[in-house]
Amino acid sequence: AQSVAQPEDQVNVAEGNPLTVKCTYSVSGNPYLFWYVQYPNRGLQFLLKYITGDNLVKGSYGFEAEFNKSQTSFHLKKPSALVSDSALYFCAVISRGNNRLAFGKGNQVVVIP
Amino acid sequence: NAGVTQTPKFRVLKTGQSMTLLCAQDMNHEYMYWYRQDPGMGLRLIHYSVGEGTTAKGEVPDGYNVSRLKKQNFLLGLESAAPSQTSVYFCASRRDTLRHQPQHFGDGTRLSIL
């Protein structure tokens, strides 16, 4: 079985401050991990992924994520948040023996001007 | 590039009516997926297809049917709509068998069942 937990429903951050969105996962074996962003009335857009190798992954729009195998976490980070980063963020995992992507419930990020 | 296109964008049905949601992708992707999104529940997989002519059940398949007669199209059918099927439906595609390939999503169909 594979699953993702995003423990916070909403993350509020002031513009210019660092942004962190938390994600922990559970899979059998080595995972592939993803972050997606969803703006209002739109589909999900791919931000970044972890396959293997370097634990720090860089993605679109200045986002990065850190893979931590011992803590089974894949937190999304941005050094300086913008108001335009306000959106719904989804973490997802797929194990190497599975065809299905498992999504977390999503985190609403609100960046306050 | 159109990517993944879903039609219609909005629809209101009465209980018991039937309808078909269409998903079309122009990226020559092998895999296609149908999800539903409900508040606080993330995305749940309804059905998926690993290639033309194939379909498989996902996490919440009851009350839905699918067909993939052409590689570029993936249809989701509701034979007898129920209020519990009120949701936002998303179609996605993935290039091939490599599981680390990202999925590409359409902008959704907002469906209300009265």
Image (cartoon, rainbow, N blue to C red):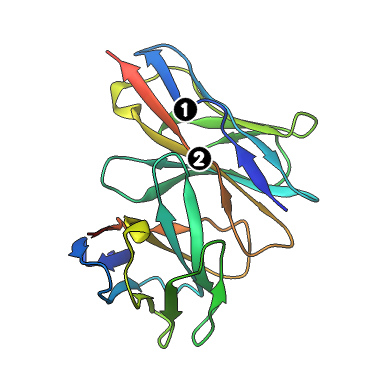
- Say which quadrant the C terminus of chain B sits in: bottom left
- Residue A57: x, y in percent? 60, 36
Mark 1 lies on a secondary structure that is: loop
Q: Residue at x 74, y 62 (%)?
A: A97
Residue position for label 2: A105
Kindly identify which numbered label has been placed on residue A9: 1
Residue type at tag 1 = Asp
Indicate the quadrant where residue A88 lies: top left
Kindly identify which numbered label has been placed on residue A64: none
Q: Which residue is drawn at 77% across and 49% down?
A: A30
| Residue A44 in sight from this viewpoint | yes
Mark 2 lies on a secondary structure that is: loop
- Residue A2: x, y in percent? 69, 50
Pointer 2 indicates a residue of which chain?
Answer: A
- Decide if residue A34 is on the left or right side of residue A46: right
The reply to whether discs 1 and 2 touch (Cβ–Cβ < 8 Å) is yes
Mark 1, Cα crowd under 10 Å, few <14 / some 14-19 / many 20+, is few
- Decide if residue A62 is on the left or right side of residue B1: right
- Residue A100: x, y in percent? 60, 61
Residue type at tag 2 = Lys
Q: Which residue is drawn at 37% across and 12% down?
A: A16
